[in-house]
Image (spheres, rainbow, N blue to C red):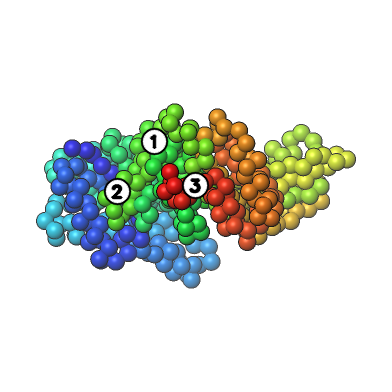
Amino acid sequence: MALIVQKYGGASLATPEKMLFVADRIIKEKNKGNQMVVVVSAPGDTTDNLIEFAEKLAKEPDSRELDMLMATGEQQSIALMSMALIEKGYKAKSFTGMQLGIMTDTKHTKARILDIKGAGKIKQALKDGYICIVAGFQGMTQDEQVTTLGRGGSDLTAVALATAIKADVCEFLKDVPGVMTTNPEICKEAKKIDFLSYDEMLELSSGGAQVLYNRSVEFAKNYGVVLHVRGTFTDKTGTIIKKEDSGMEKTVVSGITYNKKEAKITIKGVPDRPGIASYIFNKIADGDVNVDMIIQNVSDKGMTDISFTVFRKDLGKAKKLLDPIVKKIDAKGYFVDENIGKVSAVGVGMRTHTGIASAMFKALAEKKINILMISTSEIKISVVVLEDQVEDAVRALHAAFKLGKKKASAE
């Protein structure tokens, strides 16, 4: 008997028929003798529809009230799923984040989990034979204000809950059979990856892969929670994400990921003296804008240019910050390029293999794809290219590193 936490996204819960299918899947695991805790997102496009409604009433909805509104989506799912299971003759009980004492900080719409005080309620319900259905994405502050965890936050709820109740595995049920070598909608040769390290999955998620929320992967790494990404409509094993082992290094590049939702900002004529970069990026961080890649040009006559990328959704906030920054440091101005995207190759094997960067750049050059920026880490190489060349770049790199199905069948 295993203690399993499963997480189902909104697409799997969009219709009564899909909910009943998920209920049967949960029952199948329960009938194997497993204890089941199920974390659910809001049904279908419920959260998007709620936000759209709110934005018709207020240009910038109050963040506290937005959290109060968005948290209702998951409450629909837990009640409906519990009803479905009860109708099928099984004991089920629903829990909101507040009922479980999922404590967060005070940052509305992107709060961080600090503690789960009500894990004992889950353990008791399991002992009493219940299937526990938990609302993802939500929690509360010390003074009982409702908070949400940001897009993908239900993934974080699942991992945090798995940690709190010491689950054997945390499963994520998706409309794909596991984590793929790249987006199969762009590259038909994409195939499922059997095993990934936490660091690889973190880099893939941060680089644009939407299969798992990067904060949930970071949480799993910190607490050693084994993750299993698998298909909702298949019983086959998906992708296991766990602590790195020596066998993982045999695969040089595990996957290619991309993000078309970035913009590049270049500050021109920045005085090249100590403390300037620190000032710029401290002010940007204080304005709640996340910076991804940064490049500073070689100094010329005491002046330099600094380029960096931000998420396109943060561009409005970034622009408001830049005017006073440019004035304060006596720079010549700034310009923005929204027509860019980032493509990344990820793999722990990069630590022990050479020539990865040269192979990557050669593949892009052969497709006449110009590289605008480059960033590297131990297990990732990222490039910024024109947005309309992102998909070509993904396909070129996927082929160059022989990640597709044809290689697998040939072997």
Q: Considering only vertical position in the picture, is 141 above or below 319?
A: above
User: Residue at the location (44% across, 47% down)?
Assistant: 410
Circle 1 residue: 242
Quadrant where the N terminus sits is top left
Residue type, label 2: Lys
The kind of residue on which mark 1 rests is: Lys
Chain-order first, disc 1 or disc 2: 2
Pick the front one: 288 or 202? 202
Return the x and y of residue 371 as percentages of the image width and height.
69, 50
Secondary structure state at the residue bearing disc 1: strand
Going by the picture, which residue comes out furthest to the left? 89
Are the residues flagged by discs 3 and 2 in contact, CB closer than 8 Å? no
- Is residue 103 visible in the rendered image? The answer is no
Q: Secondary structure at mark 3?
A: loop
- Residue 236's disc is 2
Q: Position of residue 106 (x, y in %)?
A: 45, 46
Residue located beneath label 3 in the image: 403
Q: Give the SS element for disc 2.
A: loop
Tell me the distance, in whole angstroms, between the alpha carbons under discs 1 and 2.
18 Å
